[in-house]
């Protein structure tokens, strides 16, 4: 039975592809990584993780947000401040010490409703609302902060 991302979706046909052999090796070595945005502007999902459809959708949304921020002009990349909780949550990750990657990670997590984003600020949610609009994402679908923090 084909998966929901084997079919055209809100991000267009081919937004998600099968991982290449080197990406499969990466996922084997990093079993906690559910998916990633690739250099070819697509998303690959970890074939070793059995995600529920809503989880898959959230991972794809998260990674597509990263791609959208990378493709945009510098003015469309986040420049908000991170909270101390968010900084702490990124310790020991590849994003530690990389402020731009850290901001993009938090923005993508907020958009996809990932609770590891931590409590958001107004500036962060302003950015995420704009990102959602640029991506054509309906924020009422349960994403974009998932009802946490200062947005309510």
Image: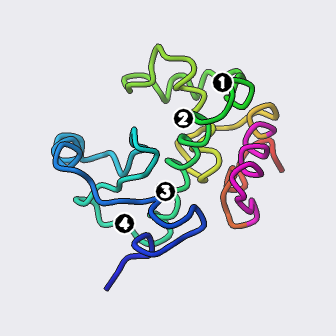
Residue located beneath label 1 in the image: 83
Check residue 51 in the rendering and tell me which mark sits there, or answer none: 4
CA–CA distance between discs 2 and 3?
13 Å
Q: Earlier in the sequence, mark 3 or mark 1?
A: 3
Give SS at disc 2.
helix
Q: Are marks 3 and 1 in contact (CB under 8 Å)?
A: no
CA–CA distance between discs 3 and 4?
11 Å
Q: Nearer the viewer, mark 2 or mark 3?
A: 3
In the picture shown, does residue 74 fall above or below 151?
above
In the picture shown, does residue 122 fall above or below 63?
above
Q: Earlier in the sequence, mark 2 or mark 4?
A: 4
Q: Which residues are magenta?
A: 126-140
Give SS at disc 3.
helix
Q: Residues within 10 Å of mark 2 (few under 14, many from 20)?
A: many
Front one among 147 and 8 = 8
Residue 66 lies, in percent from the top left, at 54, 40
Residue lying farthest to the top in this orientation: 97
* Prevailing secondary structure of the magenta residues: helix
Q: In percent of the image, x 49 and y 56: which residue is there?
A: 60
Q: Earlier in the sequence, mark 4 or mark 1?
A: 4
Residue located beneath label 3 in the image: 60
Give SS at disc 4.
loop
Q: In percent of the image, x 22 and y 50: which residue is there?
A: 20
Residue lying farthest to the bottom in this orientation: 1
Residue 76 lies, in percent from the top left, at 72, 31
Residue 62 lies, in percent from the top left, at 53, 49
Q: What colouring does the structure picture have? A: rainbow
Q: Are marks 4 and 1 in contact (CB under 8 Å)?
A: no
CA–CA distance between discs 2 and 4?
20 Å
Q: Is residue 96 left or right of residue 141?
A: left
Q: In percent of the image, x 67 and y 64: which residue is there?
A: 142
């Amino acid at each position: 039975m084909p998966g929901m991302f084997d079919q055209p979706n809100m991000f267009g046909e081919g937004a998600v592809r099968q991982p290449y052999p080197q990406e499969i090796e990466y996922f084997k070595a990093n079993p906690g990584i559910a998916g990633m945005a690739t250099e070819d502007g697509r998303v690959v999902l970890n074939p070793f993780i059995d995600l529920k459809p809503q989880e898959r959708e959230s991972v794809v949304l998260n990674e597509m947000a990263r791609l959208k921020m990378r493709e945009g002009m510098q003015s469309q990349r986040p420049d908000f401040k991170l909270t101390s909780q968010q900084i702490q949550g990124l310790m020991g990750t590849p994003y530690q010490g990389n402020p731009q990657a850290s901001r993009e990670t938090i923005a993508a997590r907020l958009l996809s409703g990932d609770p590891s984003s931590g409590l958001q600020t107004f500036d962060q949610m302003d950015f995420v609302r704009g990102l959602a609009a640029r991506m054509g994402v309906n924020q009422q679908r349960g994403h974009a902060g998932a009802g946490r923090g200062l947005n309510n």
